[in-house]
Amino acid sequence: MPRSHSTNASLRRFVAVPRALAAAVALTLAAAVVLTLAVGSDPLVAFAQQQVDPPVPAGPTRAEYLIGYGDELSIFIFGEAEAHEVVVRPDGRITLPLVGDIEAEGVPPTLLAKSIAKRLEPFQKEPVVTVAVREIRSYRLFMLGRVGTQGMIESPTPLRLLQALAMAGGLNDFANKKILVMRESTEGPKRIGIDYDDIIKGKTPEQNIMLMSGDIVVAE
């Protein structure tokens, strides 16, 4: 075969490869343009969005603290020089000047602040009130069943389920890893079933719930 004919054939093969690659790139950009027309965004942004990993499920959220009997509160009323330091009485109430007795047990600090401000409206124009929990003395849980140590747990801060189990010595060797949380609420008694293994394995992190004062945790 003549040398010139062989050289031309090699050149044609060399040119064919970039042309095939260019065609593939053109098809990719065309697909991105079609996606852009559908969703109304920049082609490169649309293409990049396809490469983003799906969002990771959020972990358990922290519930707002509910004031309890024995808690010490600092109540700030705008315009007054000093805060009012009060302790929630056994009847669940506190007493403030101009406000009188007001229910504090079982409500979050933000709601108590709004209730106090409402009582002050006849005496002040648009009163501003802030309630801070200075010291928690009311948070108590009860651990029963197949745990290391049964009994009452007191804590200065609210606890999640796994934290409370750790304070009770964890589950013992006879536990079947099923947990029941019994809770009193305004709607009546509640029973919350939880699978310990699923929490540990990361299948249901939301089951590592924030426990409320008075909760009874039973390890089965």
Image: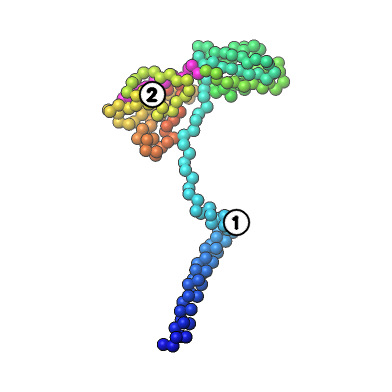
Please tell me in which quadrant of the rendered image residue 182 appears.
Answer: top left
Q: Is residue 216 left or right of residue 92?
A: left
Q: Which amino acid, mark 1? A: Asp
Q: Name the residue under label 2.
A: 167
Of residues 73 and 204, the one nearer the viewer is: 73
Q: Mark 1 points at which residue?
A: 42
Which type of secondary structure does the marked residue at label 1 adopt?
A: loop
Of residues 12 and 75, the one nearer the viewer is: 12
Q: In this view, does 175 lie to the left or right of 76?
A: left
- The magenta span reads 136-147
Query: Which quadrant is home to the N terminus?
Result: bottom left
Q: Point out the residue furthest to the bottom here.
A: 2
**Disc marking residue 210:** none
Looking at the image, residue 90 lies above or below residue 66: above
Query: Which quadrant is home to the C terminus?
Result: top left
Q: Is residue 218 left or right of residue 90?
A: left
Q: How many numbered discs, if any?
A: 2
Percent across and percent down for residue 76 are 63, 18
Residue drawn at point x = 70 percent, y = 16 percent: 123
Which type of secondary structure does the marked residue at label 2 adopt?
A: helix
Q: How far apart are marks 1 and 2 (CA)?
A: 54 Å
